[in-house]
Each structure stands twice: as C-alpha cells, then as structure tokens.
C-alpha cells in the first residue's frame, strides 16, 4: 500500500522530470481514489504547492514549474468533468494581463488553478477601462493580474479605482516579477494581495472564504 | 590615495582583478534620456542624436563609468518583423510574436543588419558617442542572446513548449538567431562599442534548470561569444545564476550581471579572479529609496564585493526603471563617491 504522501512525492518527481507518462500512470495506478477531486486534493494540489514553493526559493526553475502545471492541467481536464458539482463551490476567478504580451505568468496561473478544479475565465490582455466591463458582466469574485513590467503595475491602481467606483466586490491579486523583487509594491497599487507562486493564490482564496465556509471545504 | 582614473581605466583595472581608484559604477539609464531631451519615449528613439546627447548629459551629471547605447529589447523583434509597444512611462515592450508555428522556423532567415533601419540608428548613436568620448568612457552595446530572443519571437510559453516538446526545431532556430546575434554584436563593436552586454535571462536558473541549460543556452553562448570580436558580459536581467556560475565562466564571458535575489558576497566568491561581477542594487525598490537607503544599499554592495577588483556596481536588471527619481540617482552617485574609494572598508565577508 503506497501512502498519499509517497504518491505525491512520486507525482511531484514525475512532473519535475517532465515525464507525462509516469505522471499519468501514477494517477491511474495502484492507489484507488474515490473521485477525481480526491486525486486533485490529495495528490495534485500538494505536489503543485511544493513545486511552487521550490520555484519561489530558487530550488527549481520556472520552466519546470510551467511544465508541471501544464501536465497537471491536461490530467485534470481528462479526469474531471467540465460540469462537476464540486467546481460550483469555488469562487469565480478571472485572469488578465494589463496591456502587454508577456503571457507566460497568466498561462501558468490558469493551468495551476484548472489543475485544482477551478473554473477560470481568461480575459487575455486589456486596458482597465475595458476589463472593468467584463468583470461586471461575468460577476468575477477574484481577478488575478499578471504583470512583468513595472510601469504596468500602475494600471492596477486605475483598475482598483474603477472597481471601487462601480462598487464591485471583485478582489485583486497581483503577481509577477516586480512583486517578487518588491514585496510592498502590491499595497502601493491598491491590490488586495500578491502572489509570488500560484499556491499563494489558493491561500488567499481560502483566507477570504474562511468566515463563510467550514474548514473541510477549504482547498489546500 | 590613488590617482584619479578615467572611467575606461577604472573599468579595465577592475576587469584585470586589480583595485582602481574607486569602484566602477554603471548606471544603466535608457528611457530617462527622453526626459533629458524633452520628448516622448517613442520620439526619443526615433532620433539617434537624441539618444547620444542624452547619454552624454546623463553621464556628465551622475558621473558613472559607462555610456549605454542600448535602446530597448524589442528593437530586435522589430528587426525580425515584429512590433514594439511604446509607453509614456516605461521601457518599450515587445508586441505579438512573429513566429506562429514551429514549422515556420525551418525557413527562417536572419534579418540583415545593414538593411534594417532601426538597427542602424543604434549604430549611429554608438558612433556619435565614440566620436565624443574616444577611449575615455566605455560604451556598452547590447544584444539579446540567441537563446533568449525566442521569448519575443515565439512567446514565452510556446518557446518552453518548443524546448521540451518539439526540440527538433530548436537547432534551426538557434542557427538563425546566432547568425543574427553575431552580426549585430560585431556591427556595434565596429561602430565604436567597447563591449557587448549579452542579455540571456532564459539561461538563468530562475528560468531554466541547469541540466537543460547545459544542453541548450550554454552551448549557444559558447558558440556565439566565441564569434563576437570584442569583450562580452552576460546579464541575467534579474535572474539567478549562482548554480551555473562555473558554466557561465566557461562560455568565455568577462562579466556576469547578478540578481538582487542572490547574495553578492557569495556570487563574488564563486567568480573570484575569473569573471567580474556586476550588480546588484534592487532596481524596483530603488523607486522609493530615501538618501539613507540608497547610501546603505551602495555601501553594503561595495563591502560585499569590491575588494580586490573584479566588481562593477550596478542595478540587478540591466536597466533603471523610469519611476526611479532623479534624486535617487544622485544619491547613488554620491554614495559611490563616498564609499567606493579604494582601499575601502573590510570587504567580501
């Protein structure tokens, strides 16, 4: 009998070696799971969380983190029905960049969240004045903005003002290289939180849901 | 007290692992030149004379030890047929990728430097700078490494997909990019650049694991740097490099630009007497530094890495953000004068 922990370690190792076959084999192998969400919660989420922490500390590279999220997303999309009822309990999440074409961070966040069974709306890249209408229409609870260039972080300020003036409940989580180099920056631009790695996002989501949900419904 | 050296003497001295009169300081200013000339950033880069004039003025004002003929990274994307996006308050960004399928790579041809007007402007700037300063002040030219350029050519995620899932197209892409990079670097050297900064962030361990780097970016750098007819420095643009410093040294580079995420003393120790370390002031936090924090950052960096030469004080990214106030740049300059004189405080500990 292989423990969840050992299984997670093996899965993490397969992801970091970019070994799709081994990763898929572990999900469909000797450990039997009661549902796709059990696989996500017991194996995939902890493995991706550890991979994210290792990237943050410099132990592994961004390329490994990206490929791990990509492979996990493929696996989850193949085992979890699009309309699984478990997906409904999650907040509505949107992801965007604010006017540039550096899309890797956004791509990684989407893969990561979909690997955990979240539904994510990809808004592409837009100016705040356009994005605000989409947030309103889609009733987005949490917007993740991925930013590479320092000058574009200032657009979050603009977006914050628009969200406040429309009295939307949308919270903003900012992520990307400038925030890694300056941990105070997100406060200056009016974001509600920042995320260095993707699992930080889930921690924030759980933190915000804390008051309204029982502990077993939190994600990580 | 040592005799006052020219910026060129100062830099050459540190590159020879000797202690010059004081710590060389590279203030890598780009878009700030538009403010200097009083035009928009887009207009600034339309005129080679604007860039040269601003570089000379800024060097005179801040007293740093180089001129930077670099325009913006997306200039190379423009040479390959892409577009650049100009902002009023930041560095010019890359537009959409120019390669939309991996198959296109097989018929890819490198742009010709003499036939690309945008590249010629940089050469004109370089020539004006050279005419003005001769051999007194180093002029730093820039190329994107053939291994890092595909982030703009293909988009980052597609490029990682290519490396891991379609490696059969990798060599063809590198061949085209290497041809271009070598021609572009040598044209800048011929126009008057003293050295070439080889921007290679994808090779940093922040982006690429060492095992993959050794099979890809490392081999590309060895081949490319060997064909560039002048000194080169490799810059990771904020990425980490400690685990591959030994490998970077083997590529033939003379300088390594290091990240603020790494301990400068550790980096210096790993490079000791083999390559010069450049870095690593935090260019993002710099936007809100007070005179005290600026002085403290300069003093700390110098105390960690300046002893014995082989060190150039600079930012960690290879470009100072537009948002850094002029006063902070002056504070940095004053702090270098105050704390950078050799022999300095007890260092490298």
Image: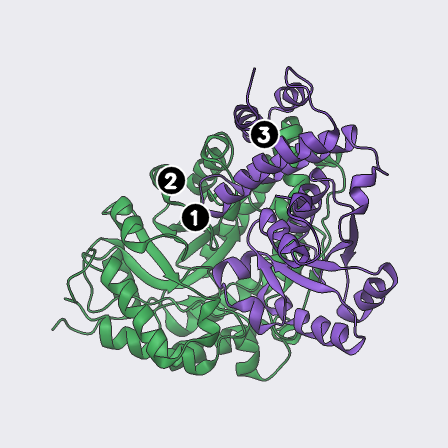
Chain colours: A purple, B green
Name the residue beneath numbered marker 3. A15
Question: In this picture, is A30 found above or below B155?
Answer: above
The CA span between labels 3 and 2 is 21 Å
Classify the position of the N terminus of chain B by image quarter.
bottom left
x and y, in percent, of residue B189 in the image: 45, 55
Q: Chain of mark 2?
A: B
Q: Mark 2 = which residue?
A: B243
SS for dot 3: helix
Q: Name the residue at 81% across, 75% down.
A: A166
Q: Position of residue A201 (x, y in %)?
A: 62, 52
Real-space CA distance between mark 1 and mark 3, rounded to the nearest whole angstrom: 22 Å
Which label was assigned to residue B240? 1
Front-lying residue, B28 or B123 = B28
Q: Quadrant of the C terminus of chain B?
A: bottom left
Indicate the chain on which mark 1 is placed: B
Marks 2,1: beta carbons within 8 A: yes
Circles 1 and 3 on the same chain:
no
Q: Is residue B216 left or right of residue B113?
A: left
The residue at 57%/34% (across/down) is A47
The residue tagged with tag 1: helix, strand or loop?
Answer: loop
Residue A123, picture quadrant: bottom right
């Amino acid at each position: 009998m292989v423990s969840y922990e050992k299984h997670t370690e093996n899965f993490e190792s397969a992801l970091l070696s970019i070994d799709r076959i081994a990763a898929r084999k572990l999900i469909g192998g000797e450990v039997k799971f009661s549902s796709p969400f059990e696989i996500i919660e017991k194996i995939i989420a902890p493995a991706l969380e550890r991979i994210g922490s290792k990237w943050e500390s410099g132990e592994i590279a961004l390329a490994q983190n990206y490929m791990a999220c990509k492979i996990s997303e493929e696996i989850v999309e193949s085992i979890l029905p699009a309309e699984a009822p478990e997906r409904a309990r999650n907040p509505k999440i949107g992801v965007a960049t604010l006017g540039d074409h550096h899309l890797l961070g956004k791509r990684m966040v989407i893969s990561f969240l979909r690997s955990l069974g979240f539904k994510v709306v990809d808004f592409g890249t837009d100016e705040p004045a356009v994005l605000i209408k989409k947030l309103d229409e889609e009733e987005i609870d949490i917007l993740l903005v991925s930013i590479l260039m320092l000058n574009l972080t200032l657009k979050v300020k603009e977006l914050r003002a628009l969200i406040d003036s429309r009295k939307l409940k949308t919270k903003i989580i900012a992520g990307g290289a400038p925030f890694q180099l300056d941990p105070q920056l997100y406060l200056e631009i009016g974001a509600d939180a920042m995320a260095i790695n993707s699992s930080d996002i889930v921690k924030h989501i759980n933190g915000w849901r804390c008051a309204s949900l029982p502990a077993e419904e939190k994600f990580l | 007290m040592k005799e006052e050296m020219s910026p060129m003497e100062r830099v050459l001295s540190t590159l020879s692992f000797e202690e010059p009169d004081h710590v060389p300081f590279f203030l890598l200013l780009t878009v700030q030149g538009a403010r200097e000339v009083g035009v928009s950033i887009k207009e600034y880069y339309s005129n080679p004379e604007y860039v040269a004039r601003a570089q000379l003025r800024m060097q005179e004002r801040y007293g740093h030890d180089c001129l930077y003929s670099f325009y913006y990274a997306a200039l190379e994307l423009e040479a390959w047929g892409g577009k650049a996006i100009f902002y009023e308050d930041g560095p010019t960004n890359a537009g959409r990728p120019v390669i939309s399928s991996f198959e296109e790579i097989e018929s890819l041809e490198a742009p010709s430097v003499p036939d690309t007007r945008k590249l010629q402007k940089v050469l004109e700037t370089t020539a004006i700078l050279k005419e003005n300063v001769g051999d007194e002040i180093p002029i730093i030219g820039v190329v994107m490494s053939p291994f890092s350029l595909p982030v703009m050519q293909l988009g980052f995620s597609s490029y990682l997909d290519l490396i891991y899932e379609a490696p059969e197209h990798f060599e063809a892409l590198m061949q085209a990019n290497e041809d271009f990079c070598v021609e572009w670097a040598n044209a800048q050297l011929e126009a008057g650049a003293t050295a070439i900064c080889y921007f290679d962030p994808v090779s940093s361990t922040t982006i690429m694991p060492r095992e993959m780097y050794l099979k890809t970016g490392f081999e590309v750098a060895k081949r490319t740097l060997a064909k560039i007819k002048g000194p080169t420095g490799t810059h990771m643009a904020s990425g980490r490099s400690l685990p591959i410093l030994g490998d970077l040294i083997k590529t033939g580079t003379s300088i390594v630009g290091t990240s603020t995420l790494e301990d400068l003393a550790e980096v210096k120790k790993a490079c000791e007497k083999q390559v010069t370390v450049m870095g690593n002031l935090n260019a993002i936090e710099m936007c809100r530094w007070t005179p005290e924090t600026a002085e403290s950052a300069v003093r700390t960096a110098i105390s960690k890495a300046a002893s014995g030469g082989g060190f150039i004080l600079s930012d960690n990214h290879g470009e100072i953000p537009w948002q850094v106030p002029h006063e902070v740049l002056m504070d940095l300059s004053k702090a270098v004068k105050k704390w950078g004189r050799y022999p300095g405080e007890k260092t490298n500990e």
